[in-house]
Image (tube, helix red, strand yellow):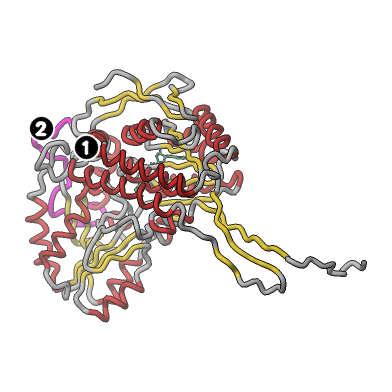
């Protein structure tokens, strides 16, 4: 471990916490301390918000020609690509995920900065055909202002990039707060940005707990927009806090995502293979994990047998070691939460087919590992089916026919993503339109890319990230009307 404390980046300078407190960052593979970072509090968040406010109000960023903002963001993407191996290693150390996954993340992240760099100067506004004679009307987009951005621990830098890149492209200034347990790659991005020509105060990174630093960003009346990715209960508290000054809100919350396999799915082994990816990447700690597997009755038994045998072969280990297929859970606390769901599921009558406990291998005992776990005999009203476990756990529900599949799949408070597998063209059209989810995959699972919008129906969130819509979240629309021939109306007499 490097013994220097890593500080917050505020107003173009590196700051220790006002309180002087620090926090140890832990490698979930072995419980060892990998870094020490400043542990901010409300006061630190206030200092960062003020820096972002002053930078925004000075117009040093929003008045910079959009093509110049784009140029800087594009270069940031290039710098991320150049440092991608360092960043990927840091992400794997901090989260436990495999290097292959972290490398994908970094390639994506570089692309996200480049994508929004390219969009920064593309909006030409909209001319409206004014219904009033001798007048002009147009709608223009302007940056919202100061953006508080709060990211989770499962995809620390990817989620930060989804927020920072469009906000900066739009001309906003940002105060980013990464999860207190996985801040290292976000700090590294601040370090890269600090070496570039971003004006001071445009990019700020504060560290510390959600309950103080995150809540301050949500409440602070100098913040114009709060963008949050994380759990549903935190999202609700942020909505309440944001009411102080009626902030704009963007929420990416949890999911409990059905993966429906119809008997006419075509190649069962392909559907099975993608179902495994859909759940066990990053040990199931993915908001869009296909943890609700729904199998048509006629293929249920065959599919479950094959699934069990594939799951039993998943290789757990250190994400930094080649050949590891699944890393640990993020923390001891999260492991305890996942373990508790085993009792909940069994009490509700789900049948444990595989896993359900920590592995026994000696080299995994210091990490927060949990075995790939399969429950069959699950019903739609069980807690294990309705609640987000956020671990390597699949529940299997059996259904008969399309109507039942759609009804069961939609029977959730969440609406992030759903997938279904079929070779019937008519069914493809019907089911895709009936599923109430922000993303629907047909004959695939867990595919997302920068160009397409991402976000949830129902309680999975508000607003969209990625795509053109992800940029629009960070803009206000202004209608500008000009009368070319003003005359008195005479309403109140002349
Ligand atoms: P979390 O809600 O505990 O924390 C997320 C972030 O919010 C952290 O930075 C945390 O410090 C902060 N926070 C906590 N309490 C806060 C408060 N009162 N006010 C302001 N900020 C606060 O979530 P997590 O455990 O880090 O992440 C897992 C959750 O994130 C899962 O529910 C998952 O589904 C969700 N997630 C959603 C998406 C998506 O795109 N929809 C993507 C990734 C993760």
| Drawn side of residue 70 relative to residue 481, left or right | left
Residue identifier under label 2: 363
Q: Which residue occupies the extreme right position in the image?
A: 494
Label 1 Cα crowd, 10 Å radius (few <14 / some 14-19 / many 20+): some
Q: Which mark is residue 28?
A: none
Label 2 Cα crowd, 10 Å radius (few <14 / some 14-19 / many 20+): few
- Please tell me in which quadrant of the rendered image residue 359 appears: top left
Q: Residue at x 16, y 36 (%)?
A: 320
Tell me which label, 2 or 1, sits earlier in the chain: 1
Image quadrant holding the N terminus, namely: top left
| Drawn side of residue 263 relative to residue 185, left or right | left
Q: CA distance from mark 2 to mark 1?
A: 25 Å
Answer above or below: position of 5 versus 96: above
| Tag 2 secondary structure | helix
**Residue 335 in view here:** no
Q: Position of residue 489 (x, y in %)?
A: 84, 69
**Residue 135 in view here:** yes
Residue 198 in magenta? Answer: no
Image quadrant holding the C terminus, namely: bottom right
Q: Position of residue 53 (x, y in %)?
A: 57, 37
Foreground residue among 307 and 206: 206
Answer above or below: position of 362 versus 21: below
Q: Which mark is residue 85?
A: 1
| Tag 1 secondary structure | helix
- Please tell me in which quadrant of the rendered image residue 149 appears: top left
Magenta residue span: 346-366
Q: Position of residue 179 (x, y in %)?
A: 37, 37
Q: Residue at x 35, y 67 (%)?
A: 410
Is label 2's Cβ within 8 Å of ligand 1?
no
Answer above or below: position of 122 versus 59: below
Foreground residue among 237 and 376: 237
């Amino acid at each position: 471990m490097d013994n220097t404390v890593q500080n917050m980046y505020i107003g173009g300078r590196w700051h220790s916490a006002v309180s002087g407190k620090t926090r140890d960052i832990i490698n979930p593979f072995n419980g060892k301390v990998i870094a020490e970072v400043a542990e901010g509090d409300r006061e630190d968040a206030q200092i960062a918000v003020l820096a972002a406010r002053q930078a925004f109000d000075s117009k040093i960023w929003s008045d910079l020609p959009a093509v110049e903002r784009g140029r800087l963001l594009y270069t940031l993407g290039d710098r991320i690509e150049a440092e991608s191996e360092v960043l990927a290693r840091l992400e794997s150390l901090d989260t436990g995920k495999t290097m292959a996954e972290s490398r994908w993340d970094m390639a994506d992240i570089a692309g996200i900065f480049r994508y929004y760099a390219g969009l920064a100067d593309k909006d030409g506004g909209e001319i409206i055909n004014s219904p009033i004679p001798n007048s002009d009307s147009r709608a223009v987009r302007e940056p919202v202002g100061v953006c508080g951005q709060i990211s989770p621990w499962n995809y620390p830098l990817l989620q930060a990039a989804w927020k920072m890149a469009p906000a900066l492209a739009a001309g906003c200034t940002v105060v980013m707060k990464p999860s207190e347990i996985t801040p290292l790659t976000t700090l590294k991005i601040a370090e890269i940005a600090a070496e570039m020509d971003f004006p001071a105060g445009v990019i700020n990174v504060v560290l510390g707990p959600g309950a103080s630093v995150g809540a301050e960003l949500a409440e602070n009346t100098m913040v114009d927009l709060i963008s949050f990715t994380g759990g549903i209960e935190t999202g609700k508290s942020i909505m309440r806090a944001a009411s102080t000054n009626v902030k704009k809100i963007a929420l990416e919350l949890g999911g409990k995502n059905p993966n429906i396999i119809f008997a006419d799915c075509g190649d069962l082994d392909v559907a099975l293979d993608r179902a495994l990816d859909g759940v066990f990447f990053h040990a199931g700690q993915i908001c869009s994990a296909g943890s609700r597997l729904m199998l048509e009755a006629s293929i249920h038994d065959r599919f479950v047998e094959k699934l069990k045998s594939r799951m039993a072969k998943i290789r757990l280990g250190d994400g930094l070691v080649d050949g590891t297929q699944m890393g640990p859970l993020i923390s001891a606390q999260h492991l305890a939460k996942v373990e508790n769901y085993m009792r909940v599921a069994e009490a509700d009558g789900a049948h444990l087919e595989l896993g359900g406990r920590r592995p026994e291998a000696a080299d995994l005992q210091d990490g927060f590992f949990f075995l790939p776990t399969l429950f069959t005999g699950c019903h739609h009203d069980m807690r294990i089916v309705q609640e987000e476990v956020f671990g390597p756990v699949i529940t299997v529900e059996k259904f008969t026919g399309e109507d039942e599949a759609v009804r069961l799949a939609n029977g959730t408070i969440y609406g992030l993503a759903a997938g279904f597998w079929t070779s019937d063209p008519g069914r493809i059209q019907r089911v895709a339109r009936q599923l109430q989810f922000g993303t629907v995959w047909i004959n695939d699972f867990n595919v997302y890319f920068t160009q397409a919008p991402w976000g949830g129906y129902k309680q999975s969130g508000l607003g969209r990230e990625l795509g053109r819509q992800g940029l629009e979240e960070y803009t206000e629309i202004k209608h500008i009307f000009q009368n070319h021939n003003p005359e008195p109306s005479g309403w109140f007499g002349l």
